[in-house]
Amino acid sequence: MILFIISALITFYSAQLLWHSYTLASIEEILLLVCNIICGLFLMIAARYKRTIERSLSNAATNIDEDLYYNTLERKTYHASYYVQSAVVLSFLGFTTGFIFFRDSNPKLVLIAFVLCFLALFFFLPNPKMMTLTYPHYKIPDPKSKDPVADTLAYYDDGQKYLLLKSLYRLYFFILFAFVLLILGLMYYSIFSGNNQTVSILGIGVILLIMMNALSRSLKPAKITKESLTKHVN
């Protein structure tokens, strides 16, 4: 409830600033204020979802509608995560761009974006009650574990692993395609605007190189030796 109130106050304050200064503010300031308002609204919706889910979990479901009851709560949990993740990205973009343009002329806007970014990251932390709906048997891996990824995957059943692999595989190729389009877009932008984007293009190219080689490296079979074959047979 406290997070909802803080998000509401920030949203109301940003809307008030936009209302009183939209005729005098620059287009960049207006965009940053709009971004702050949207982030605040997203956090308010996420906090509302969180409050509803926590209240619903305290009420026992009847045997008749138990599956439907928990399915509805699980869907609400994912809806809340959509808003939180969107708020994290937008607030981070708002803070970084605001710091570039307004750190000297209008630091108040940068501070608002930073507070929203902090709140969004706080929302992003795992909630034990809500995780019982999405991942009932999940436990935070031991920080001292040598393979935390394997420990995390061990908590998923076969159906969840299949859905996870399918979604990540689609996301992988979507990101590759988006990066290629972005490089081409930056290339044409550099040509027609005169603003050289070589550093950005090289940075994206390095990320592409790491992504593609990381996938190939993960799929590469381990080296087989005579000793390992002997141990396997025994």
Image: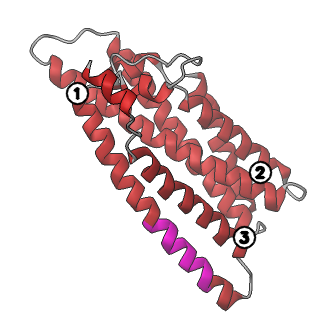
Q: CA distance from mark 2 to mark 3?
A: 28 Å
Residue closest to the eye, 234 or 14: 234
- Give the label on residue 199, or none: 3
x 58%, y 48%: residue: 89
Q: Measured along the vertical axis of the image, is residue 167 above or below residue 225? A: below
Q: Please tell me which residue lies in front, 177 or 211.
A: 211
Which residue position is annotated with label 1?
A: 71
Mark nearer the N terminus (2 vs 3): 2
Which quadrant is home to the C terminus? Answer: top left
Residue 215 marker = none
Q: Magenta segment range?
A: 177-188
- Assess whether residue 67 is covered by the magenta stretch: no
Three-letter code, disc 2: Leu
**Is residue 192 something one can see in this rendering?**
yes
The part of the image, by quadrant, that contains residue 128 is top left
Who comes first in sequence, dot 3 or dot 1?
Answer: 1
Residue extending farthest to the right is 104
Marks 3 and 1 sit apart, C-alpha to C-alpha, by 47 Å
Nearest to viewer (mark 3 / mark 1): 3
